[in-house]
Image (cartoon, helix red, strand yellow):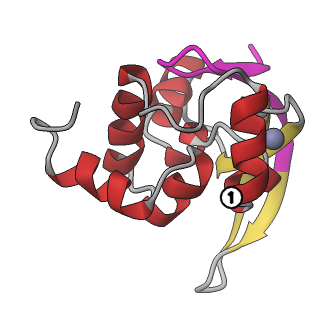
Amino acid sequence: MAIDSYTTRKKRTFLYVGDEPYTTKDGRAITISVWEAKCRFCRAPYTVTAPGRRETQTDAEYLAFLDKSASFGIVHCEKHRMKKKQAIAAWRAAGHDAQRKLSRDDVLEIRKLLSKGHRPKTLALVYPVSVSTIYQIKYHQSTYK
Ligand SMILES: [Zn+2]
């Protein structure tokens, strides 16, 4: 059976686009899989890549393997990952108050993304808050409201 989509534990669904050949830094030819989702802010489609499926992996094994990939923690298109001004505008357009503190769900998601290796600088652009706020969430979890 072919896998045509993958849904994360956060209930975000990525559609399987296809496989692409890829050459690693040490020169090995491997296959990566390409997945598409819609930006949380603007709904534009964006893609992420993950390791390709091995011939020996069953559907269940491969999906469990994808659960460990940090790629699926990305919830925004390239634009909203990178441009703070646009991210703030979109944040407001989505009904959020830019002056308000992050919601509890936001904080929980930021912690999860940090635990998956996302950099505070990147998360600060996405949410958008100051980098120090992200570090506050990272190192003072019990005291952050
Ligand atoms: Zn976007």
Could you say where residue 62 lies in the image, as x and y percent from the top left? 55, 30
Is 48 located above or below residue 35 in the figure? below
Q: Quadrant of the N terminus?
A: top right
Please state the quadrant of the image where ligand 1 appears.
Answer: top right
The foreground one among 5 and 13 is 13
- Of all residues, the one furthest to the left in this rendering is 142
Is residue 34 something one can see in this rendering? Answer: no
> Helix or strand or loop: what does disc 1 sit on?
helix
Which residue sits at x=48%, y=32%? 100
Q: Quadrant of the C terminus?
A: top left
Could you say where residue 51 lies in the image, as x and y percent from the top left? 61, 50
Could you say where residue 47 lies in the image, as x and y percent from the top left? 80, 44
In the rendered image, residue 14 lying in the magenta stretch gets the answer: yes
The foreground one among 105 and 95 is 95
Residue of label 1: 84
Which residue sits at x=78%, y=45%? 77
Residue 28's quadrant in the figure?
Answer: bottom right
- Relative to 4, is 60 on the left or the right? left
Which residue sits at x=77%, y=34%? 39
- Relative to 91, is 18 on the left or the right? right
Which segment did they paint magenta? 1-19
